[in-house]
Amino acid sequence: MQRILATLLALALSAPAAFAHDFTLGSLEIRHPASRATLPGQPVGGGFMTITNKGAEPDRLVSVAAPDVSDDVQLHEMAVENDVMKMRQLPDGIDIPAGATVELKSGGLHVMFMKIKRPFKEGETFKATLTFEKAGTVDVDFDVEAAKPGAKHGHGG
């Protein structure tokens, strides 16, 4: 019985945690980069994550590159202007104030993968490189979650 328990414990400790997709770059913590499954023929996909700046200096996410899935990745914001929801590109990037947490989510700040090369399928992952103005670059893995908003990890929508 002890051998079985020891084997199970070893397997549990060696398996990646379901939410272990957190990355660190200097004083920045990038939590749970994710996208949603897309429909065949859908030309774009969204990207979501939470970035916490534990440092004393502000930083800025200036670009995201994901050449395996899109040659054109943009940073966007959804905002209400004159009672109309509008999406706009943020060519200067997304500010990450010192000591603050910024959530990239549906309906707010987010990443847009334009002209995607193939549909995003639930359960897959894809690599991307985040570039910050001060901290530099970090490679992350985006989890592709269920198409229905909030179906898995509650990324709202």
Image: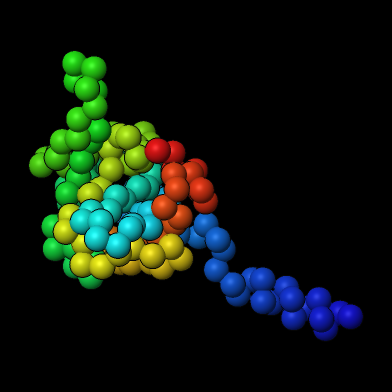
Residue at image x 18%, y 55%? 114
Residue extending farthest bottom: 3
Position of 43 with respect to 153 (left or right) is left
Q: Is residue 1 left or right of residue 152?
A: right
Of residue 39 and residue 82, the one placed in the foreground of this image is 39
- Image quadrant occupied by the N terminus: bottom right
- Residue 60 versus residue 105: which sits nearer the camera? 105
Relative image position of residue 122 (x, y in whole percent):
43, 62
Please name the residue shown 60% across and 75% down the image.
Answer: 14
Q: Residue visible at 48% across and 44% down?
A: 150
**Does the rendering let one see residue 75?**
yes
Q: Nearer the viewer, residue 24 or 114?
A: 114
List x then y, in percent, for residue 153: 51, 48
Specify the quadrant that holds the C terminus. Answer: top left
Against 116, residue 62 (above or below) is above
Q: How many badges with numbers are in the image?
A: 0
Of residues 11 and 154, which is closer to you in this image?
A: 154
The quadrant where residue 141 appears: bottom left
Residue 126, position as x, y percentages in the image: 33, 67
Q: How is the image coloured?
A: rainbow
Q: Is residue 12 left or right of residue 134?
A: right
Q: Residue, x 17% and y 49% (percent of image)?
A: 74
Measured as percent of width and height from the top left, residue 130 is found at 24, 56
Q: Is residue 48 above or below residue 7?
A: above
Instruction: Name the residue furthest right.
Output: 1
Residue reaching furthest to the left: 91
Residue 53 can be seen, yes or no? no
Residue 105, picture quadrant: top left
